[in-house]
Image (spheres, rainbow, N blue to C red):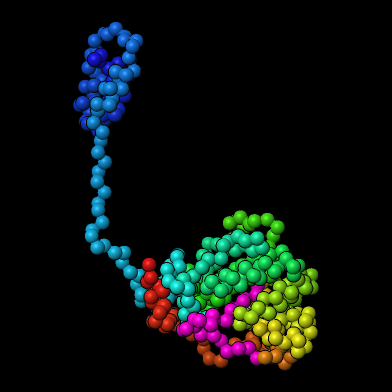
């Protein structure tokens, strides 16, 4: 077998650097006697030499001890951090547990971020989860939107993967039966992730006051809210008082319209979106409904109260810091939902 060429010697020196400087230098400096080239197999000989070299053995990785388990979360933390830290749903049967503002959600289902007539906004929040009945409702409403003159839905916050209190934002949205729908129509293209984070919803108010802006508010928005409020599974829809008044003007305060208008409730804020709340599914023991809304349109004296100073006066007494909600403040089943893997 012929001796390796100087070039191959250099290559071997690099490959065997792990063996120590002395061996590497020896391979480079050793005299190589002249040899006649063998045109029959000059490459094969060098490959054989390389193949004979030992392969370095990687260092073994430390093994995980038998029985090791990831430490459980610190259950003394506020519940909003515990539930806000779970990125996946609880692998349990779908179930809304507790009340809209004090509960949790098992077996949550995500609303796909894109549909034919909807797009989910603010994806970084991971709040596009809900009870399967909420997902079905949103898909029904989105399918009807084009016939109402509405291009499609921009869906805001729903619930976290396991429901529960949120680190920021809502007091409700805890049991997978609430969803915010923007009063901005869906664009005619698929929004990028950056657009979904940066795009702002449009306020319906004129000069941030107590009337809707006629240059922005349209009958198509009124038709969309009416369609949502007419769904038999809807418990309430929250809108700004000025939007409630616009809906009363749109529909007319008649007995025929009282049914769906009664489900549309004036509330603080809610001039960029409307908030849909479904009733507890009939088979969901432990899910607590609100009392039904009054069986009248809510367009008369009830609404007039919102246009006085009374709703906006500071409450008597010194405001104090609200106590954090703990896991022990939620229904007992929420511990199982939080820890299920």
Residue visible at 62% across and 80% down?
A: 234
Numbered range of the magenta stretch: 273-294
Residue 41 located within the stretch drawn in magenta: no
How many marks the image carries: the answer is 0
* Relative horizontal placement of residue 329, taking residue 125 as reference (left or right): left
Nearer-the-camera pick, 204 or 332: 332
Residue 41 in view here: yes
Residue 328 falls in image quadrant: bottom left
Nearer-the-camera pick, 267 or 40: 40
Q: Main secondary structure of the magenta part?
A: loop
x and y percentages locating residue 273 in the rendered image: 65, 72
* Relative horizontal placement of residue 2, taking residue 179 as reference (left or right): left
x and y percentages locating residue 35 in the rendered image: 27, 8
x and y percentages locating residue 27 in the rendered image: 24, 21
Residue 119 falls in image quadrant: bottom right
Residue 102 in view here: no
Residue 275 located within the stretch drawn in magenta: yes
Nearer-the-camera pick, 83 or 136: 136
Q: Residue furthest front?
A: 283
* Relative horizontal placement of residue 160, taking residue 19 as reference (left or right): right
Residue visible at 36% across and 75% down?
A: 75
**161 relative to 46, above or below:** below
């Amino acid at each position: 077998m012929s001796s390796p060429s100087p070039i191959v010697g250099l290559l071997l020196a690099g490959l065997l650097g792990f063996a120590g400087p002395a061996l590497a230098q020896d391979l480079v400096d050793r005299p190589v006697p002249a040899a006649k080239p063998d045109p029959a197999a000059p490459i094969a000989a060098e490959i054989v030499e390389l193949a004979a070299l030992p392969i370095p053995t990687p260092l073994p990785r430390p093994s995980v001890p038998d029985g090791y388990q990831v430490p459980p979360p610190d259950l003394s933390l506020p519940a909003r951090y515990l539930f806000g830290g779970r990125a996946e749903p609880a692998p349990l049967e779908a179930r809304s547990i507790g009340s809209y503002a004090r509960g949790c959600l098992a077996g949550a289902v995500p609303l796909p971020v894109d549909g034919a007539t909807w797009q989910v906004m603010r994806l970084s929040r991971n709040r596009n989860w809900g009870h399967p009945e909420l997902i079905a409702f949103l898909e029904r409403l989105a399918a009807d939107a084009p016939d109402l003159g509405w291009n499609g839905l921009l869906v805001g916050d729903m619930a976290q993967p396991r429901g529960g209190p949120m680190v920021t934002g809502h007091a409700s949205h805890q049991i997978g039966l609430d969803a915010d729908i923007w009063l901005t129509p869906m664009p005619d293209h698929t929004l990028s992730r950056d657009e979904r984070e940066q795009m702002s919803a449009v306020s319906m108010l004129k000069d941030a006051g107590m009337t809707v802006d006629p240059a922005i508010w349209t009958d198509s928005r009124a038709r969309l809210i009416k369609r949502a409020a007419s769904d038999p599974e809807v418990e309430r829809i929250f809108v700004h008082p000025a939007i409630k008044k616009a809906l009363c003007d749109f529909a007319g305060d008649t007995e025929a319209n009282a049914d769906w208008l009664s489900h549309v409730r004036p509330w603080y804020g809610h001039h960029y979106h409307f908030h849909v709340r479904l009733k507890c599914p009939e088979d969901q023991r432990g899910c607590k409904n609100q009392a039904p809304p009054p069986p009248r349109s809510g367009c008369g004296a009830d609404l007039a109260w919102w246009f006085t100073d009374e709703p906006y006066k500071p409450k008597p007494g010194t405001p104090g810091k609200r106590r954090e909600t703990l896991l022990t403040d939620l229904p007992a089943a929420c511990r199982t939902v939080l820890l299920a893997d």
